[in-house]
Structure formats: C-alpha cells, structure tokens
Amino acid sequence: MQSAIQSVTHNLPVFVQRPAIALIGQECYTTLVYNVDLSSTHCLKYAISKALGLGIVVFGSIMKVPQILNIVNNRSARGISLSMYTLEVMAYAISLAYAVRSRLPFSTYGENASLTVQNMIILLLVIAYTADGKTGRVDPSAHSTKITFAAALMGIGSLALATPSIIPAQTLTFLQACTIPISLASKVPQMAELYREKSRGQLSSFVVFAQLLGTIARIFTTMTETDDKLLLWGFGLAGVFNAVIAAQVMYYWNGDKALAEQKKRDGEKIGLHSSSSANIAPSFEPFSVSTHGPPKAGGRKLD
C-alpha cells in the first residue's frame, strides 16, 4: 500500500510540490508526503498546525459575516454588547500589529486582519442600530456623528499601532500584554447582556461557536509553531471565556420563544382583568346629597 502511494507522491507536479513545501518545509514534506512516513510526531504536529492555521485564516475572513447580516437584516442590535465589541476591536488591532511587527508566521495570526475589520464593521452597526432610549425607535441617521467619530478613532488608532515611530516595540509589547485583560474584559459585557436579556437576541450562535473552536485551534498552533507565552496565555484564557458565552447561548437557545410566550400570557392576563372590571355593575345610589346646589338627577334631597 505504501509503495503504491509513494509511486504517486514521487511524481507530484511542481505546482503541487512548491505550495506544500512552502507550507510545511522541505524536511517535513520529504518525510510526510514524499516518503509517506507518518511516524514523525514533530512533522505530523507541525503539518496539522499549519493546516489548522491556514483553515482559520481562510474561515476567519468570513467568520463574522453572519453576525453582520443578522444586524442589517433585522435592523436591530438587541442582545449585542457595544462594550464587548469596543474592547474586542482594541484587542484585535493590538494583537495584529504585534504579530506583524514581530514577524510571526502568517499562519499563526492571519485571520486577525480580517476579523479586526469585521469587528470594526459590527461596532459601527451596533452604534447605528441601537434603539433610542426614550422613543425605542431605531434610526441610523440619528447616530451619524457617533459613527463618524468611532470610524475616525479606529483608523487613527490602527495607523498609530502600525507605526514604530509613534508606538515603539517596547510599548507595543506592553500593549500586547494588556490585550489579555482587555480581551477577557470584552467578554464580560456580553455575558451580562445574555443574562439580562435571557435571550440570544441578534447574537449569532454560529459566530459564538466558531470563535470557541478558533481559539482552541489557535492554542494548538501557537504551542506548535511559536514559543510566545503572551499569545498562548491570551488564547487560553479567551478560550475559557468563549466557552462560557457558548454555554449561555445554549442555555438561552429558546429565550426569544419563552419571552414571546411570557408577553402573550401577560397580555391575556391584562385582557382578562379589563374584561372582569367592565362586567362589574356600577354601585346603585338611591340618594345623592349635594351641599352646593340642587339634588342630582335621579335622586331626592333628604329632609
């Protein structure tokens, strides 16, 4: 069987060989592909890590599109925490700048670029589609100033993070360390929002579970391809918090239905109470006493 497979792997075309060698290196390509030798634990783990990393990079480019569509199609940001996305944008932007400027392998952070942009879009949409506190109406045009200010702030911040003359390497390393508490803090408002609403609202369950799986995969790729403890701690703790949010989403899976049924029951109670009140006969008063004028019609003045 192995010799039959080797007869194929020994004659792979160049356009297949080159990308594979670029991905896993000449040594592991020779071991795993050319010789079909799966006994090398090092090369096997490395190849799996590279494949996972590439998959995350590709999948990350569209991961939060369902969340964006949820908000736009429903014209509502109910159940989505603005605080969470504000902190998440900060953490993602800093981590992206740190990885690029540290020249880490692209497969260990590539999805950060697209996820940073997607988070920025979601942040602006949450601002636009948040209902007015007084009227309860959703009017994106009423938030145009806030949207413009937020977009400008994110653009300036990203430029500063990418410029060593503005934010030197030591400062960026400190900021990267800060992303761990920032990233964890970004999850807390969403946990609180889910607990308060007792419902998922417009929060995409697909995105929640994808984030959980992504952080688990990133723990593996970081352990395999780099020795950066900051990134490893960040992904590890983020995985724990993402697991809590995923558990909440499962617990409140039918929250919208339960809320609708509760409102229906409350409405029926109000209707029944109103009906009962209407059926009570008005009290009969055979006499009415007036101290400021003639007796009321239908009554007689007491002697």
Image: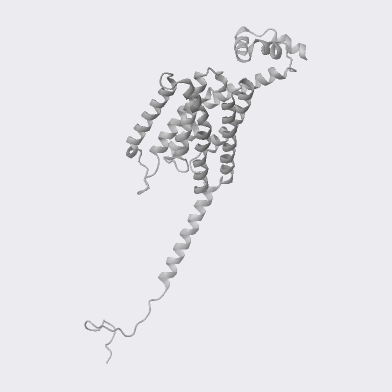
Q: Position of residue 178 (x, y in %)?
A: 50, 31
Residue 212 in view, yes or no: no
Decide: is 12 above or below 168.
Answer: above
- 262 left or right, relative to 291: right
Q: Nearer the viewer, residue 88 or 270?
A: 88
The answer to whether residue 107 shows anywhere in this view is yes
Which residue appears at 55% of the width and 19% of the height?
A: 106
Q: Identify whether 172 is placed above or below 146.
A: above
Residue 144: x %, y % from top left: 33, 35
Q: Quadrant of the C terminus?
A: bottom left
Quadrant of the rendering where the N terminus is positioned: top right
Q: Residue furthest front?
A: 170
Q: Residue at x 56, y 30 (%)?
A: 234
Q: Residue 128 versus residue 232: which sits nearer the camera?
A: 232
Considering only vertical position in the picture, is 24 above or below 68?
A: above
Its colouring scheme is one colour
Q: Residue furthest bottom?
A: 303
Q: Position of residue 48 (x, y in %)?
A: 65, 22
